[in-house]
Image (spheres, helix red, strand yellow):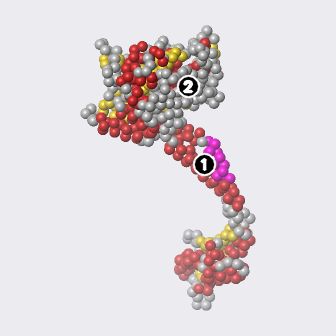
Amino acid sequence: MTGFQDRPKDGFHQPVSRPGAVALPLPKLRYGSVTRLVGHQMQDEKSSACPFREMYANTAASRILLAMGTQGEAGGRMDFSEYLGALKRCWVLLFVLTLLGGAAGFGYARSTPPMYKASSSIFVSTQRGATPSELVQGSTYTQNLIQSYAELARLPSVLEPVILRLRLTTTPELLADSVAASAPLNTVLIEITVTDSSPEQAALIANAVTDSLASTVQGISPKTAAGTPAVAMQQVAEAQAPKFPFAPNTKLLTLTGAVIGLVLAAIYALGGELLDTRIKSLKDLRRVTDLPLLGTIPTRPRRSSPDAIIMRIAPHGRSAEAYRRVAANLEYINPDATVHSVVVTSAVEGEGKSLTAVNLALALSEKFDRVLLVDADLRQPRIAHYCQIEGAAGLSKVLAGTAELRDVIVTWSGIDILPSGTVPPNPNQLISSEAMAALIRTCTAEYDIVVIDSAPLLPVTDTLPLSRITDGAVLVTRAYATRRGLLGSALDAIEGVNGHVLGMVLNGVKAPRNDHSYGYVPGGRRAVAREGQMAPASSAGMHLPEGHSDPAGVATGS
């Protein structure tokens, strides 16, 4: 069976194989073309002689591509269900903007003055031709000129008489904008259409333009032998005042406004989803890394205390079971190498690492007899506050040589806790010292498992040496808060020192509405433990130290 031998003087463990061991392949982490075996040094898939710096550059670049969603191997692109989910989450916005768009279109239609169209038709013919051949020639002549006659209807020579006749207060240029003339193909008809805000005025202008066009054409057309115009025009359809306006089209404008509002809302929803790099689900996590997901911790109700320790206040609740699942997965993450020490960290602060460490230690204590929780966050220690124990004497004094380890360990709720102690001026030097490595070796020899809460990875480098002198790190990520780029940078930092990440914990995941927690309390009586309700310490198999209250704990905080 494969295990980890006693740490050498440099404080870093080396993997060894015990006699008779059967080495099983461990899960591979794919970052572009680089594959790293868990617990071993990184090796390039294509060239094992690749320099470490080039390997690390390739790894970082590949993860950036994963975070941007350009590599399908890690599920980089959104699928159809994610698009539907984004639209579903923004259904209120979709409804409101659709309603506002329709209302805007309807308002625009109502504010626009109605416009009416009146049309008249005029027939163009030739006045000469006694034989069929002459008639055909005359018809061809007329068809060749029919388009020119239609264009003539909008010229001042035709419109000026109309203005004088109807006493209009306009100019030929302005009147031409409301007049349209067309000649249907293969016909000798000219259709005159006039647009006006008054239906009666539109009809009057259309008839007047028809009469003026006929007079103008007769004046400029060739003459026959008898001195009459060769081309004659006769009105065949008189314009009538329309009963209904043709514009604005209220229904069309309302529908168009609603569609525009819907499209804008959809663009906003989908654009926000595409540009949002926060990790919200396992799919988002897979865009950054293929590390195993040890568990997901659901969000807590608002009525719960922000410092509540869920393994104590609701040991049979949904969140408590989630922590037990993390502990079980951690125990069997590698069946051939038992995990004796784990460091709990996060990319940045505020992701719930400290409370995850406390609850994880309590969950492990249900399986192991001797569990030690170490507060190695020497910059912003939180374990003593959450557990309501004295934290003035602790790890910092042990590393400085001013206190003995056994004198500062506090027993609390079935586990031993090593508080951080006073905040030192040189936390990084203490954590990366040989004294810290020796302390980890001592603790792992005396305890079944050691859980270490450490500082975030990106603000400081305190956790990096811990990821090497322990069996590995558990990286806590808060859903809807941590961005893929930050998580990728945190993983790159651990890879840069050849550290080991055991797996991920996704914190603050929204639980389904129809999800109900249940459990069995000691004694065989079935009980439902609702989140945020206090559970007796005796029902959880825990005993409080004298002088301390039963604090509440939550998967939030640092």
Check the image and report above or below for 262 versus 244.
above
Check disc 2 and report its element: helix, strand or loop.
Answer: helix
Q: Which residue is mark 2?
A: 385
In the rendered image, the residue lying farthest to the top is 523
- Report which quarter residue 413 is drawn in: top right
Q: Is residue 137 magenta?
A: no
Q: Position of residue 34 (x, y in %)?
A: 34, 34
Check the image and report above or below for 176 versus 523.
below
Between 490 and 276, the one lying in front of the other is 490
Q: Which residue is mark 1?
A: 262
Q: Position of residue 356 (x, y in %)?
A: 51, 25
Q: Position of residue 1 (x, y in %)?
A: 34, 15
In the rendered image, the residue lying farthest to the front is 402
Q: What segment is highlighted magenta in the picture?
A: 91-103
Q: Amino acid at mark 1?
A: Leu
**Mark 2 or 1, closer to the camera:** 2
